[in-house]
Amino acid sequence: MQLPLSPTTQALAYLVSAILFIFALKGLTHPATARRGNLFGMLGMAIALGATLAGAEVQGYWLIGFAGAIGGVIGIVVARRIQMTAMPQLVAALHSFVGMAAVLVALGTFINRAQAGTLDALLIGELSAGIVIGAITFTGSVIAFAKLQGIMSGAPIKFLGQHALNALIALTTIALAVHFASTGSWVSLVLMTLLAFALGGTLIIPIGGADMPVIISMLNSYSGWAAAATGFTLHNHLLIIVGALVGFSGAILSFIMCRAMNRSIINVVFGGFGTDSSASGSAGAAVAAEKGVKSASVEDAVYWMEDANRVIVVPGYGMAVAQAQHAVKEMMELLQARDVEVRFAIHPVAGRMPGHMNVLLAEADIPYEQVQEMDEINPAFASTDVVLVVGANDVVNPAAKEDKSSPIYGMPILEAGKARQVYFLKRSMRPGYSGVDNLLFYQDNTSLIFGDAKDTIEGMVSSLKGGGH
């Protein structure tokens, strides 16, 4: 049964959806408005889906409903079960779906139009763009997922002549796309598609763990352009608008994050430094002592924090792994009850994806006004009594400012080392995701507390509840 909806009404619904998506992006720029932004996005998507399903181009609903039900069930199950530590790889996996969808839509459109004899050079050019961008997005996202999930090494995979090979694949893919647009050749189509899939993999394998937040953002941008290309293929104006919004916003975010690391996007894509996050590391206080690093107990940190006026907590991926954010919230409340000012310092590339730490802290209902970005909070470290680093590493490493030979030299950092006392919560002496030893460990005002971050914070909570010292 066809639902009546005129093209004019559908276009108006698409316009409303596009406006809501813009409001959604605006809302997502700040934690205080993020929930409202999500609601705008959900409403916009509901209107867009309803208008599309009610359009004249839809000839039947049973297959759409069946596929939608399967996808909905899978989405609900994944959303309920996924841990925050696995969110970056989930995002990468979702990007791969968008890429593959673009490839399949373009291939399906080509087959249908070829059978109907309605192919033209402009349409084939649009199909080529959708296939190439979509294929690169798909395999690039799959590689990113595998690195983040630990299925493959998180370290850069590099070999002699790699950049030349990538350039050759890219130029050959473009040449095949031009030939395909000129002739409609099946051979050119197949070869172009296979090479684009290969290029997505060869572009991402040299990316190291330290650059993964930027790559996730870049793949988000690619998925947007893939969606826009699909919109041109399907003559769907809303898909073009939404794809452009996602493409540009992802590109801008990638640029902002590269600037936060004082690196160019070209350096990130082709530099490839980092380490394997799953590699075993040196563990415990014995190794720390051998290296001249001081270790401390939970009681030492509580003693300092109870007597402090200001405490800054620097969260990192280790907090996500340990799921320690709720314990951190309880510790914050106990310190505030003792008139201790507690704030949280967020580095733009902390964690494994943009905004990772902000989401974790929001999940624990930590007030937004106590969460501050790097540029805002850096001047406060010098007047802070205690800094508690919970699972962060590279983002507080003074090597970025002091060691010109360091791969992270020039990257802006949280200047935690300027505080009176720094307590570093670590499982081991293993360096951060970039593989660079942290010079902060060796400062006179720094002590390491070894163990699981959640267990350590819960120990601090118990000590504070017991009256501390």
Image (tube, rainbow, N blue to C red):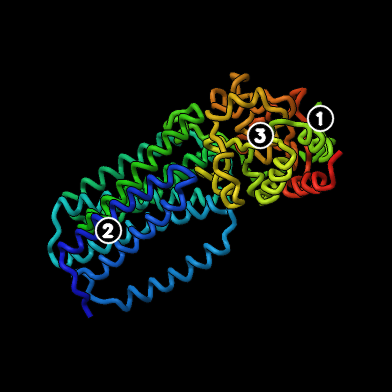
Task: Measure how far apart labels 2 and 3 are at the Cα level.
Answer: 51 Å
Task: Measure how far apart labels 2 and 1 are at the Cα level.
Answer: 60 Å
The amino acid sitting under disc 2 is Ala
Assign a secondary structure to mark 3.
Answer: strand
The amino acid sitting under disc 1 is Lys
**Identity of the residue drawn at 44% across and 33% down:** 256
On-image quarter of the C terminus = top right
* Residue holding disc 2: 106
Q: Earlier in the sequence, mark 2 or mark 3?
A: 2
Residue 312: mark: 3
Q: How many residues crowd around disc 3 within 10 Å: few (fewer than 14), some, or many (20 or more)?
A: many
Residue 62: x %, y % from top left: 32, 79
**Identity of the residue drawn at 51% across and 35% down:** 272
**Identity of the residue drawn at 80% across and 44% down:** 464
Q: How many residues crowd around disc 2 within 10 Å: few (fewer than 14), some, or many (20 or more)?
A: many
Circle 3/circle 1 CB separation < 8 Å: no
Q: Earlier in the sequence, mark 3 or mark 1?
A: 1
Above or below, 33 relative to 210:
below
Residue 294: mark: 1
Q: Is residue 95 left or right of residue 190?
A: right
The amino acid sitting under disc 3 is Ile
